[in-house]
Amino acid sequence: MAELPITAKTPAEQARAVARACRTASLATTMTGNAGHQPYASLVLVAFDHDAAPLLLISRLADHTKNILGSDRVALLCDGTAGLAEPLTGPRVSLLGLAEKTESPRHRARYLARHPSAEMYAGFGDFAFYRIHVERAHIVAGFGKIHWLDDYLYAGETAALAEAEADILQHMNTDHTDAVQLYATRLLGRSGDGWSLCGIDTEGTDLLRDGEIARLNFGRTIASAEEARAELVRLVKLARQQ
C-alpha cells in the first residue's frame, strides 16, 4: 500500500502519493473501428512527470494506442491496494485526461530510469512516449474518503529540480549507496541489497531494485538541488535512528 508523506493532508496530495508509488496501471481507452465506442482496459507500465502527470511508452500496434489515435481521451487506474487482505479498504486513484505524444528527452529519461528493461524497445519505430494531461482525478483513500479533484497535478515550481535530477541521482547512486539502502530497509521496510534511486521530484524519491519500485515520500515539498540534499540528509539521519 502506498505510504503517504507526512504533509499529505489534502486529497490531491494523497492522490499524487498513491499514483507515484505505482509501477503499473490499468489504461482505459475507447475502441475504434468495428468495435465502435466500447471501453477497453489494458495493463501498462507507468512513470510520472515532475508534476505527477503519467508517462507511458506504447506501441502503435497495440489496441490501446490505436484507440488513442482515434480518441485521445483516456482514464488510468493507479492501484495502491497491493498486499491488503481487504483491497477495497485501500487507496486507488483514477486519472482522467488527454493522452499527448511527447518527444521530450526528460520524459524519456524519467520513464527509462523507472523501467530500464524498456530501453531495448524504446527506440523501435512503432513505439512512442505519451504524457497524460490529467483534467480530473478521483481518489478513494479509504472508507468514506472519496473525492473528485480538479487540482491533481502539482502546481508548484518543478523546473529547477527537474534540471538537477540526473546529477542528484548519479551522486546518490555513486557516492551514497549506503544511504539509499537505509532508505529502502529502515524507512520503507523493503528487503534485499542493490537498491538505487531512479527518480526524485518535489514530493519524494523513487527507489528501484530488480523491477520493484518503492516510493519514499518527503516530509515537505522541495524545489531545488539544495533543498533535495537537505531532505535526503534528514531522511538518512532518521533511518539511522530506526
Image (cartoon, helix red, strand yellow):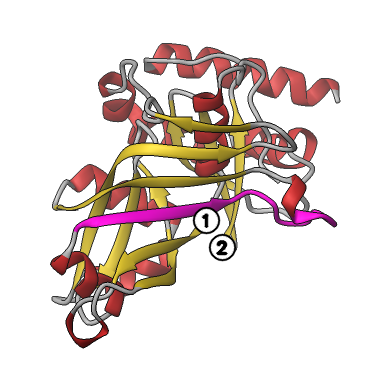
Q: In the image, residue 181 lies at what x, y percent?
A: 68, 41
The amino acid on which the numbered mark 2 sits, given as a three-letter code, is Gly
State if disc 2 and disc 1 touch (CB < 8 Å). Answer: yes
Q: Quadrant of residue 225?
A: top left
Magenta span of residues: 72-87
* Residue carrying label 2: 211
Q: SS class of the residue under badge 1?
A: loop
Would you say residue 175 is visible in this rendering?
no
Looking at the image, which residue is at 32% across and 65% down? 29
The image's mark for residue 23 is 1
Q: Left or right of 149: which side holds 99?
A: left
**Mark 1: amino acid:** Arg
| Residue at the image position 47 percent from the left and 19 percent from the top | 228
Location of residue 183 (image quadrant): top right
Q: Position of residue 57 (x, y in %)?
A: 30, 63
Q: Residues within 10 Å of mark 1 (few under 14, many from 20)?
A: some
Q: Give residue 107's position: percent from left, percent from top.
A: 26, 46
